[in-house]
Image: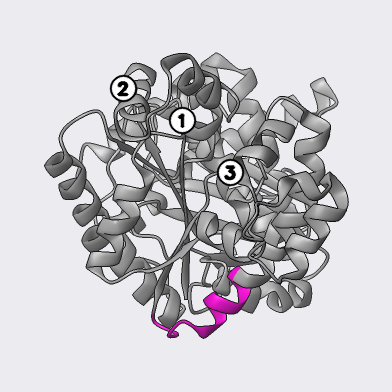
Amino acid sequence: MLRVGLTGGIGAGKSAVANRLATNGAVIVDADRLAREVVAPGTDGLARVVAAFGPDVVAADGALDRPALGARVFADPAARRRLEEIVHPLVRARTAELTAAAPTDAVVVNDVPLLVETGLAATYHLVVVVSAAEALRVERLTRDRGMAPDDARARIRAQADDAQRRAAADVLLSNDGSRDDLADAVDRLWHDRLVPYEANLRAARPAPRPPLAVLTEPDPTWPEQFDRLAARVRQTVGAGRRVDHIGSTSVPGLPAKDVIDIQLTVESLDDADGCADALAAAGFPRFPGDWWDNPRPDPATGRPGERWPKRLHGNADPGRPVNLHVRVADSPGWRYALAFRDLLRADPGERADYLAVKRRIAATAPTTREYAEAKEPWFDQVWPRLLRWIEETGWQP
């Protein structure tokens, strides 16, 4: 099933987004509600909180005295960590139970206020962040929750800041406008991205791509987008695996097709095949058929060698095209992808030459396959220059 992490700072409007997603059909797992549930009277969670913080945090009716506990932990980071060490594992366990009970075709939205702070972003197929200007959030907190303005600002600044949340966001929903504006944005997200994402994920198929190759101007967020995708790949196949940003979107300032190319390093193609099901479940299904990189000519004879085999995965998310190249460590295709990237990063002349080729081909409105094939002669031409650059610089992957 599709797992979506939903977060946002206090007063940003996260609950309004969760409610709208529920109206559209999402299964909502509310971490705040679960955090209350796991420390309800009679639970092991409450007993552990009392053991850690004393009987003064229990009200006369036997329930947790939240204001008393809040006063103990809000300004004391060590106390807050102790509380989190008790509550967070219990919430994660209950979340897993509720997620497992959802239908297999569900879109499960985990409403998690501290998703960024707890480093959970990579465990979701998609992270949605709700944002709003601080002044507007203070206004809402004073109006709707009766907070004093200074208290509202302190609560806001005790959480992750806007930059940290933006770095974690696959989708950033602005809630600076009206309720109708927010509802419309959520509905578009649901119908245009979440529903087809879930269907692609369930069918283990990459999202369809536009048929024509179109160059876009450099997007300064491409590296951040790679970081999020790479974190999910590592979460799936193991943190020790090497994952690199390759291709044109990895070269600062270079226009490119809006596709993030990623290289996952494996020990063998059998190793690659062993990762395939897990990658598909994480949202990176394999493209069917056999895939390879075209070999470059032998410098001595000018003739190409044998094909450079690999595995190729895509992204089930229709909102973010990805080519995930799974290549064997130190294989010719693996080295070429890294060396060509680094040559373009280091040499403005080669970068300009490549861009001229890309623009000339793209001007003919080619299909993606035609665009790739039309670049092959230039790759053969640059190959000897790449080999000289490697020798002269002592480049190592």
Q: Amino acid at mark 1?
A: Thr
Of helix, strand and loop, which one carries label 3? loop
N-term mark: 3 or 1: 3
Image location of residue 169, percent across then percent down: 47, 41
Q: Amino acid at mark 2?
A: Glu
Determine which quarter of the picture holds residue 180: top left
Q: Amino acid at mark 3?
A: Leu
Residue 139 got which mark? 2
N-term mark: 2 or 3: 3
Determine which quarter of the picture holds residue 175: top left
Position above or below: 128 against 61: above
The magenta region covers: 95-105
The rendered magenta stretch, by its main secondary structure, is classed as helix
Of helix, strand and loop, which one carries label 2? helix
Residue 244 got which mark? none
Q: Distance from label 2 to label 1 (Cα)?
A: 31 Å
N-term mark: 2 or 1: 2
Residue 102 in magenta stretch: yes
Q: Distance from label 3 to label 1 (Cα)?
A: 23 Å
* Most foreground residue, 100 or 169: 100
Marks 2 and 3 in Cβ contact (< 8 Å): no
**Which residue carries the number 3 mark?**
114
Circle 1: is it few (<14), some (14-19), or many (20+) Cα within 10 Å? few
Image location of residue 124, percent across then percent down: 55, 59
Left or right: residue 337 versus residue 47 is: left
Marks 2 and 1 in Cβ contact (< 8 Å): no
Position above or below: 274 against 166: below
Comparing labels 3 and 1, the label whose residue is closer to the camera: 3
Image location of residue 273, percent across then percent down: 69, 77
**Which residue carries the number 1 mark?**
221
